[in-house]
Image (spheres, grey):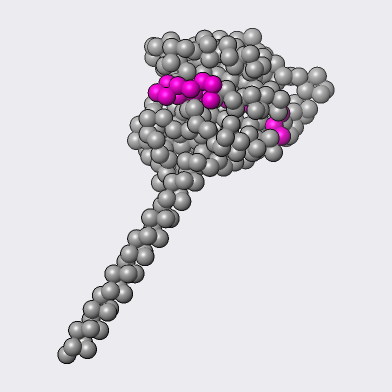
Amino acid sequence: MKDRKKEGKGKKRVLSHRRLLLLVLLTLFFAAIIYKDNKTVGVTHYEIASDRLPASFDHFRVVQLSDLHDAEFGENHHDLVKRVKMLTPNAIFITGDFIDSNRYDLDRSLRLIEELQFVAPFYFVTGNHEIATNDVERIKEELEKLDVRVLSNESLYLKGDAGDLIAIGGIEDPLSKGSDDAKTVEEFTAKTFRDVPDSMFTMLLSHRPEQFDKYVEAGIDLTFSGHAHGGQVRIPGLGGLISPGQGWFPHYTSGIHEQDGSRMVISRGLGNSIVPIRLFNQPEIVVVTLRTI
């Protein structure tokens, strides 16, 4: 009888140890996921092909950085800078929320530009957090000192090797006007491309992906957007959980969306804001390679 009791206690101890080991392993597993999804940076590659793109822009490579929110990946952004340099972009697009209005540290974010200043031309548009600081003009001035082209409801032309042109435009975040977002985006987009020929390939930098219908209506070939943070928590097989401007289970959180010949690339972004943790949603550098057909 005593032997049976000892054997039963031994089995219970083994079971208890196994449960403890399982708990430790699960804790380490989720800690590794949280670290990866908040402290490391991944790279997502897309190809966008269009018969409207001039031949001299075939293989033109854009790196998109969005929603940094004053985050830092390594000392002086070393990890992020190293990855961007390896991608050898022709242009770098910053699609808003470069800083965070809740823990505003402009100098920290500007160090990223300083480290990448001579890698490729920079193009920038505001997000809602730049507007919310009430310091947006200084932000723009500091960026322009570092040769960043700030696009404020305006467009410019890029010239290819054969003299071909494409247009890049950028709009201010609609918070800058403080009225109906959809109407403001429609107004700003029309103003930005009013002098651009309809036959020309157009790229738009705009922070808000939920306004995709307005970019489609404007006939934009390719829009770069962010803001949604990938839905903050990504549920495998379903997508993002929540996004500003879209609420629960948002539609526009990542990837490429297409409608009536207009396409939109959405970055999951790099940093966090009000919600401090991402899950199954690694910070992202987006790379878009343009191809002619």
Residue 107 belongs to magenta span: yes
The quadrant of the rendering that contains the N terminus is: bottom left
**Percent position of residue 210, x then y:** 44, 27
Residue under the point 58% across and 20% down: 124
Quadrant (top left/top right/bottom left/bottom right) for the C terminus: top right
Which residue is at a point 63% across and 13% down the rendered structure image? 145
Front residue of this view, candidates 138 and 228: 138
Number of numbered callouts drawn: 0
Q: Which residue is rendered at x = 22% and y = 89% of the image?
A: 3
- At 39% from the left edge and 11% from the top edge, which residue is drawn? 179
Is residue 252 visible in the rendered structure shown here? no
Q: Is residue 98 above or below residue 234?
A: above
Rendering coords of residue 265 (x, y %): 56, 32
Question: Please, what is the dominant secondary structure of the magenta stretch?
Answer: loop
Magenta span of residues:
87-108
Q: Is residue 88 left or right of residue 175?
A: right
Q: Is residue 97 above or below residue 151?
A: below
Q: Position of residue 259 (x, y in %)?
A: 53, 31
Which quadrant of the structure image shows residue 65? top right
Q: Is residue 73 visible?
A: yes
Q: Residue furthest left?
A: 1
Q: Is residue 243 left or right of residue 157?
A: left
Splitting the image into 4 quarters, where does residue 251 fall?
top left
Q: Nearer the viewer, residue 132 or 59?
A: 132
**Camera-nearest residue between 104 and 241:** 104
In the rendering, at what x and y percent does residue 180 appear? 39, 14
Residue 96 highlighted magenta (yes or no): yes
